[in-house]
Image: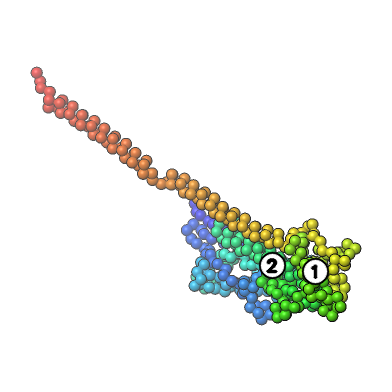
Amino acid sequence: MGIKIIPKTGTGLIDENNPILTDSKINKGLAFVNDVIMNIDGKEIKKKDFPLIIEKDKLSSIKLNININGDINKPYDVEISGIDEIKKYLNIEEIKDSNGNVVSYKINSIMPHVVLYDMQEFNQGNLKIESINFYNGSFKGLDSLYGEINDYKTQLNNLARALAISVNTIHSNSSDQSKGINFFNIEAETDIKAAEKLSINAKIKEDVFLINAGKIIDKNDSNYAPGNGERALIIGQLRNIRMEILKITSREEFLKNVYTDSNGNPITSVEPSGLNLADRNQTKIFSNNSGTTIDNYFKATISQLGVSNQEAKRMVKNQQALVDQLVVRRESISGVSLDEEMTNMLQFQRAYEANAKMISVIDQLLDVVVNGLVRR
């Protein structure tokens, strides 16, 4: 009989011809994917720049920076060409147009982080790697960790984007990003890493009097009142207004989600000279029954993180208890019990003493028979 360990490839298929181990011979080694390097329009992109969106035609090859056997002192670069091969090492989502054609790719993270390399090829100076799927164990946990962190980053980016879009729309009273004064910087509305880009508009930092707190934002209007805070109150209400945060990807979507005109008709766009979003006689802001508040969305994200943390601790505790039970069972079969061995030793000692006594009695009997009996 022999031992053969066969991995599942990145596609989930079993490769019979490339076993990791055959009997005692190790054919494949493990390598850790430390980073990824891409050159897009002359700019070097690494995993710290994820998530990001790349046009379809610009993603033709990547370089994986890997550490052989996880040793940071043994870094190697491996070039991967072709989108099908690239998808084996990166978590990629396809972005399609209205006709269903792929126009770009959203790269979320490296996946998987541990790959196999051919040891014979490596010893000959060639580094050949292949992706594999781990279904349990430490390696699966490692990839699951990165995936979960990426999910939380996505949730925070969605929250930051919705916040920037909603506040800027009301503050500038426009669905056009180029018109009016925005409270937050425009990048937070469009960038995939909105949470990182979110900051107060640089112009407002320089001059706080540019903040549009009142109902009228045109300072040349005869009804302009700098002390009026109706617009600020509307912005403040966003905390308790339910909206479909995942759908708030543009100002038009925000208006359609939570705004109507005085007749109850949905608003899809607004201009500075048109409807006034801070005038209750012209527009009304309402809670979307299908949505959630920004405050509750954030609390739900933090609560989910806490639940995941407790679940991870509980799983570690349960698995450790299971391992301890298995160790006890193994020791009960193959291990040595001092009490049991002491009992056996005493048993054998008493048996030896009994046998010695028996031999002594027989010896005495023979002595009487041979030497003690006298013929009369």
In the image: residue 109, left or right of residue 340: right
Q: Residue at x 87, y 66 (%)?
A: 281
Q: Dot 2: what SS?
A: helix
Classify the position of the C terminus by image quarter: top left
In the image: residue 147, left or right of residue 105: left
Pointers 1 and 2 in contact (C-beta within 8 Å): no
Say which amino acid is labelled 2.
Asn
Q: Dot 1: what SS?
A: helix
Direction right: furthest residue: 263
In the image: residue 126, left or right of residue 105: left
Would you name the residue on which mark 2 appears?
A: 157
Would you name the residue on which mark 1 appears?
A: 230
Numbered-mark total:
2
Q: Is residue 355 above or below residue 5?
A: above
- Residue nearest the observer in this picture, 319 or 120: 319
Q: Residue at x 61, y 64 (%)?
A: 146
Q: Residue at x 43, y 47 (%)?
A: 331
- Residue nearest the observer in this picture, 79 or 191: 191
List x then y, in percent, for residue 359. Answer: 22, 32
List x then y, in percent, for residue 120. Answer: 51, 67
Say which amino acid is labelled 1.
Glu
- Residue nearest the observer in this picture, 212 or 286: 212
N-terminal of the pair, mark 1 or mark 2, is 2
At label 2, counting other C-alpha atoms closer than 10 Å, the crowd grade (few under 14, some 14-19, many 20 or more) is many
List x then y, in percent, for residue 156. Answer: 68, 65
Between disc 1 and disc 2, the foreground one is: 1
Q: Quadrant of residue 53?
A: bottom right
